[in-house]
Amino acid sequence: MKVPVSWLRDFVDVPADAREVATRLATCGFAVEGIEGDTIDFEVTANRPDCLSVYGFAREAATAFGLPLRPIETTNVASSGGAPIPVAIDDPACGRYALAFAEITVGPSPDWLAARLTAAGVRPINNVVDVTNYVMLELGHPMHAFDAATLAGPEIHVRLARAGERLTTLDGQARTLEASMLVIADRDRAVALAGVMGGSATEVSRATRSIALESAWFQPASVRVTARRLGLKTEASARFERGADPAAPMRALARAIELLVETGVGRPTAAPVDVYPTPATPRRLQLSRDHVARLLSDRIPDQDIERTLERLEFRLSPGPGGWTVDVPSFRVDVTREADLIEDIGRHWGFDRIPTTFPPLRTTPRPSSPGAARARLLRRVLCGVGLQEAVTFTFIDREAATRFAHAGGVVPIANPLSEKFAVLRPSLLPGLLDSLAYSRRRESPDVRLFEAGAVFSPSGERQQAGWVLAGSRGEHWSGSSGPVDFFDAKGLAELVALSLGAPIDVGPTDDLPWFAAGRRARLVLADGTPVGSIGQILPAVVAEHGLGTADEVFGGEVDLDLLSRAGGSAVQPIHPIPRHPSVVRDLSILVDERLPAATVRGTIRTHAPATLVAVREFDRYQGKGVPNGQVSLSVRLTFRDADRTLTDDEVQQAVEAIVAALTREHGATLRGQ
Amino acid sequence: MTAVPDLDQLRAEFQAALDAAASAAELRALRDRFLSRKHGSVTLVVKSIASAPPEARRALGSRANALKQEIERVLDERERAAAANAPVAGAVDITLAGRMPALGRRHPLTQVRERIEDIFLAMGYQIVEGPEIEDDWHNFEALNMPPEHPARDMQDTLYLASPVPAADGGRPATLLRTHTSGMQIRYMESHEPPVRIIAPGRVYRRDSFDATHTPMFTQVEGLVVDEGIGLGDLKGTLIAFAERFFNAGVRTRFRPSFFPYTEPSAELDVECLNCHGAGCPLCKQSGWIEVLGCGMVHPAVFEAVGYDPERYTGFAFGVGIERLALRLYGVDDIRMFYENDLRFLGQLAP
């Protein structure tokens, strides 16, 4: 709301310096957007439609500066019968409808009036429309002028639009109306959108000789719906949808007529009509002195409380423990005691409220487990060289669909654009975008992770995901090679270890975004799927702006499932073994298609309980290994908790294992 | 025979030779020259004691031995030092690049968020987390924003095309939360006061992209409810936060504002970190920057969750992490936080 200080001074003798006025009112709840010359641009919060007016600001300024406020003097234009245009309210969304009548001569406004409108940011149009706008800016009450000769009947009906009814509004737009929209109609057709905008067929033109001036009150929700449905925000709709003053219509008409006469535009021709079926009852609130002290942490003297509220035009009468307060009709925001206390606090000054600290009366309850889990995960993954990324929750539908399970994706009803049309079903597409972004900008080696929510039609889940591309690290002493599947797998194992839940790989059937032969589902010990890893399909990588030859590996795990499996109990630390372990290495030749897990399984099945670890440490194909076979080297660790193992028994165990491998997989010991 | 001046001269000769000796070989030669069993010059003096006059023998003997021990000690020391500096086999070019393990960084938004969380954790708050897709009750209605409330415009909302079941079996989600206040409602619905929580997380509004707006951003909201909580407690808590987050002496001010779920409502400003209050383009010449919104919990919110507003009062606040991160890191475009450019993220402290 742009408020010229000179206009403000019509009503209150505030200092002429705009900066001084702005600074003072800023501490009362009106943030200053800017100052231009004499005009202060205040931000008016949604609860204060009364301050979408110069007079509203005059009231606040009078209270803030402790100065008297001059009332707007208007000759009361009494309502009487014999109206030239009858008014009928057919829908309760219109609470009051008043019309005044005048003969006018259309022309330009006087300079002073046009200048004030311009300063307040409203473009002058003609001397009639300008008066309605002037009154709206001064009093906060929107009005509308019809060319009376264009109204069929002439009569006015305030009714709901007929579905499909057409109206060309003042902005030249031909609009199709819906049955939820309140309109002003004449005998035949809609002539204005109630509280939003007039129609062009009945607008005041150079030829207009007589006008019907509308000053009404519409339900905020009704105006809001119409404005939203049509995407049409106006000065009028902004005021009505926040809540106009039901007592204002007649005062606004009187002020407008007065201005028309004063500026020589015209003269009233008949007494106004005022249809006000159910006059609003003023709100009455109880204000407790103790409640003021409790909410504001301070005992504010009675005289300050009374002075502030009375200057803001509340009526107070003392009662036991406080006051009975009558709320003025323009303060639509004041519905409870707390609203009054806010007004007291605003004008007392928040900076004068003492600074205290809430006592901690009980032990704090523990935080959500997810918070600590996310911190742990971030530290572990950053510690091993992954960079944390933050990507958007909503993504392109096609990119999302590539990574969605059979259930599909969750679309947004009113997305900002097609690029942000659906909720992400996976962290991978966003991470892939970020990876591609950096790879195209001088950072070939990218390792990113993100922890966050993903969505499917069955709900929201917390996941961690990672993507890797490029080399593991370049150094003058030699490269450690490009990242591969086992980097992605190792990260999954690391995340699972961090959350205390061991995982294994399981069969893949539905991970179409990963390349066949380089993908795996991750499962818990009981077989529950908890995630997946693999090389992202080259075609998908290409869709994110990389070359098809770029190998990108990724993985994703469900954090809720993992941490539930891991539990939160601290695990006991086992005593360090007192007896030495015995290590034996075996190199065997087996079919290259035989999974290492099967070899480990056979070894475990045929080993004594003293076998505590089995782990492959080399895998070789090439010279000396027949085609179709692979040399797999495994390290076996034997240990007994209670005694030192003898060479003999270890040798026997190894022989039994070799025999089983030979029997079951046709394995031969290498170098024999 | 004049043996006495010989010793002083010998010490001087040794000192001069020692000063000139640099290598282990030179030190070895020095040891040979002065201490050799056959012809070492000190050895010869010691040997000559037997032929000295009896009255001088004793004094000469002790002085000659002292010199011998001194030379031995000094040479031992110098030889140890020389040995320590001898290169081992395989000396390296120490100026080649080290093999530094790769280290990732937490995202700047995470770093700011954890910094805020830590301040409130130290004040006895607990962190609560909740769903990012919400139902209308938790996002709006329970927060004193009934349907058609004009304040809903302040937070233009992204809606789901069709409802999605809630994890807790409650009302299905129909929208992307516009703030994390829904978690405060959920918490109050299931816990009795006193309440002292922070609710961090992503929130969504239908804002177009520009240098200061993205449709997704991150918040930390807080809520304190107990008997006798007043605006002074809100001020004390948030000033303490600002001092910990920025610096101990930072100037703050509370401006009245409006939020549907608090009454009175306020915004906390801190002096502009750039111009320290003098006025600059960063703070639009005001000398202040907006840090957070806050206020005393509206009694309608307490009624919605079944708390007695006569008995309990409380305060709530909401901090926008991106805004603080922009200030803290001196970044001028919020979109940088979502590009994840390694040249940007790699500059952060680990």
Image (spheres, coloured by chain):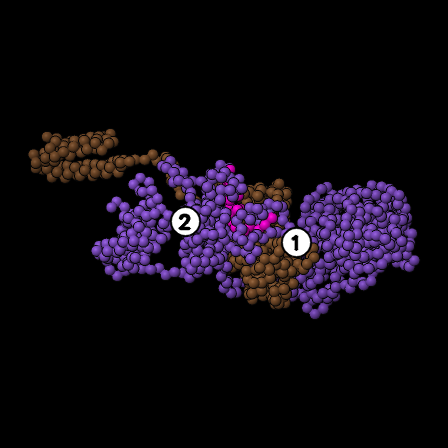
Tell me which chain the residue with mark 2 is part of. A
Dominant SS in magenta: helix
Q: Colour of chain A?
A: purple
**Residue A141 at least partly seen:** no
> Is B311 placed above or below A636 here?
below
Distance between mark 1 and mark 2 Cα atoms: 52 Å
Question: Residue A149: which disc?
Answer: none
In the figure, residue A608 lies in which quadrant?
Answer: bottom left
Task: Say if the magenta span includes residue A434.
Answer: yes
User: A13 or A415, which is in the foreground?
Assistant: A415
Task: Give the chain ID for the brown colour.
Answer: B
- Secondary structure of the residue carrying numbered label 1: strand
State which region is magenta. A421-440
Whether residue B65 can be seen here: yes
Residue B40 within the segment the image draws in magenta:
no
Disc 2 residue type? Gly
Q: Secondary structure at mark 2?
A: helix
Query: Is A443 in front, or is A619?
Result: A619
Residue at which label 1 appears: B257
In this rendering, is residue A502 above or below B75? below
Circle number at residue A490: 2
Q: Write the residue at 69% across / 57% down.
A: B149
Q: Position of residue B302 (x, y in %)?
A: 62, 64
Q: Nearer the viewer, residue A132 or A547?
A: A547
